[in-house]
Amino acid sequence: MDAAAIIPGLEPAARERLVVARAVELKRGQKVFEPGQACAAFLVVTAGTVRVSTVTSTGRELLLYRVAEGETCVLTTACLLAGADYDAEGVTESDVEAIAIPKALFEELMAMSPAFRSFVFSSYGVRLRDLIGLVQDVSQRQLDRRLARFLVDRAATPLTMTQQEIAAELGTAREVVSRLLKQFAADGLVQIERKSIVVAAPKRLARLAGGV
């Protein structure tokens, strides 16, 4: 399958230019790109799946998304548009077939072809929404550590902020903070007074904040 066949409404002139795009075949487990690598081509996957992930500050792998048949890589698009290097890793999860559109041709098509621009930005928008959902999910799953760090940093004196104010600082809902504080209190980490929160076990709370 060529690139023109999967880009709807592509103009004749753009189709002619796409004949220089080359087919790429990758084996399962092959690295497609890695952090610090320059982006040389826009890839459209025509068969198989590519896994895109990064490593967190704690050394754990975080899956960002997968690129499947008919899809493009949002990170590749971003790097091409910004002239930046990759800051994540892409590895094939199966044998993969793709169309590689060289950077110079990508830029030419972005300038000359409304259909190509629409395809690129439509794919980019869909994937960006997925990434925003991932960020929100990770943020919520790590909120207990963030709240623990917030309390540890202010453990010298009783904290007189309201739960709503704490929630605003952490970018979450008051109900989430209330639930976590009740759990912290049940675990003996804090004491919830009428108008303040007292850190009862700063060392244990610090360990929670550090994820150990």
Image (tube, helix red, strand yellow):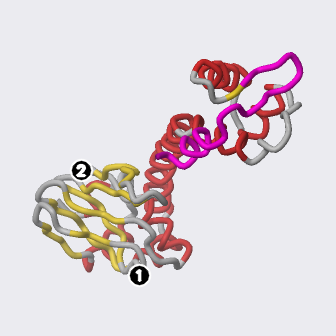
The reply to whether the C-beta atoms of the residues labelled 1 and 2 are less than 8 Å apart is no
Residue sitting at x 28%, y 55%: 51
163 is within the stretch colored magenta: no
- Please, is residue 16 above or below residue 47 in the view? below
Point out residue 46 in the picture as x, y percentages from the top left corner.
Answer: 21, 56
Q: Which residues are magenta?
A: 191-212
Q: Residues within 10 Å of mark 1 (few under 14, many from 20)?
A: some
Q: In the drawing, does residue 18 fall left or right of residue 129?
A: left
Q: Can you tell which mark lies on residue 211?
A: none
Q: Residues within 10 Å of mark 2 (few under 14, many from 20)?
A: some
Which residue is under mark 2?
Answer: 69
Closest to the observer, 116 or 191: 191
Closest to the observer, 131 or 208: 208
Give the CA separation, mark 1 to mark 2.
24 Å
Secondary-structure class at tag 2? loop
Residue sitting at x 47%, y 73%: 80
Q: In the drawing, does residue 133 fall left or right of residue 158?
A: left
